[in-house]
Image: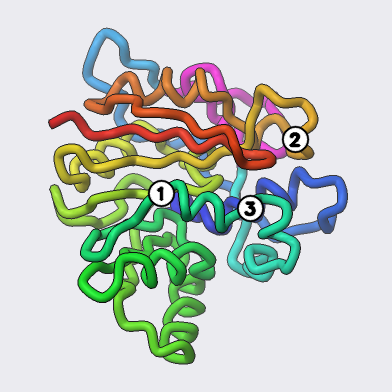
Amino acid sequence: MKLLRCSTWLFSLLLACNPVAPADLPTKTATPTKPGPPPKSKESPGYEVLKNHDPDGIGKFYMGREIAQVMGHEAAGWLDRPEREKEEQSSNLLKALDLKNGEVVADIGAGTGYFSFPMAAKVAPKGKVLAVEIQQEMLDIIAKRMKERKVENIDLILGTETDPKLRDGSVDLMLLVDVYHEFSDPYAMIVTMVKALKPGGRLVFVEFRAEDEKVPIKPVHKMSEKQVKKEMALHPLKHVKTIETLPWQHVIIFEREK
């Protein structure tokens, strides 16, 4: 799931976009010539492939925005950088999720497990985290840390660009931190993700605010609340609320319709 390179994605966002970040980060560019099937409705947005595009995009457009490149696992260390908590206030995001013992949480684009491990602690002892990635190398990193930290309630799942490989109706909450804007086939991916949610289950997007020019991220790596709502309107989801208390990102929360 080059798509699920989310964790990796968080990294590419900041990395590729942060003025103080290293200039040459390993990236993996999704192939723009093989879009998945468009929605079967009159509202079908489809995909458009253009030769002239943003250097940080893949040249594939979806509902008026260009899909961004993702970074490779070689740059995974960026996800655990010491200043991340100060820049993003990740601990406040975790509080906002209000996770409970016994819940099943999917960390889509889990990367190195930056969010997987604290979420696993919050849903323990009866709950678990499904760490989904499209790069086996990332899952290997999480597996090593699980052994070192003696954490047993994280399941490692190798997904694809269109399917997180989750069982239908099995997940209470899905977290996508700076990942969705890099999905190479966003429509197909969301379709399969929604199926995996329980009725009333939450789908949480954390994206850098496109509405704020002061956020030090390149435009192709940002998303506005309006754009996220526009794309989710094609799916059986209801917008619940948007949290704007983080320094650079919004937290946009949807529920699967019951």
Tell me the residue at 22%/19% (across/down): 40
Kind of residue at disc 2: Val
In the rendered image, residue 57, in percent from the top left (x then y), is placed at 64, 36
The label nearer to you, 1 versus 2, is 1
Mark 2 highlights which residue? 215
At 55% from the left and 45% from the top, the residue drawn is 178
Q: How much space separates mark 1 and mark 2, taking CA atoms?
A: 23 Å
Q: Is residue 16 magenta?
A: no
Residue at 32% from the left image edge and 37% from the top image edge: 190
What's the residue at 51%, 46% (across, down)? 179
Quote the CA–CA distance across marks 1 and 3.
13 Å
The three-letter code of the residue at mark 1 reads: Leu
Which residue is disc 1 drawn over?
Answer: 97
Quadrant assignment for the C terminus: top left
Q: Name which quarter of the figure residue 222 lies in.
A: top right
Ranked by sequence position, the earlier of labels 1 and 3 is 3
Q: Say whether disc 1 or disc 2 marks the residue closer to the N-terminus.
A: 1
Q: CA distance from mark 2 to mark 3?
A: 14 Å
Task: Check disc 3 and give the amino acid type.
Answer: Gln
Q: Which residues are magenta?
A: 47-68
Is 82 on the left-hand or right-hand side of 150? right
In the rendered structure, the answer to whether residue 173 lies left or right of residue 205 reads left
The residue carrying pointer 3 sits among few (fewer than 14), some (14 to 19) or many (20 or more) residues within 10 Å by Cα, namely: some
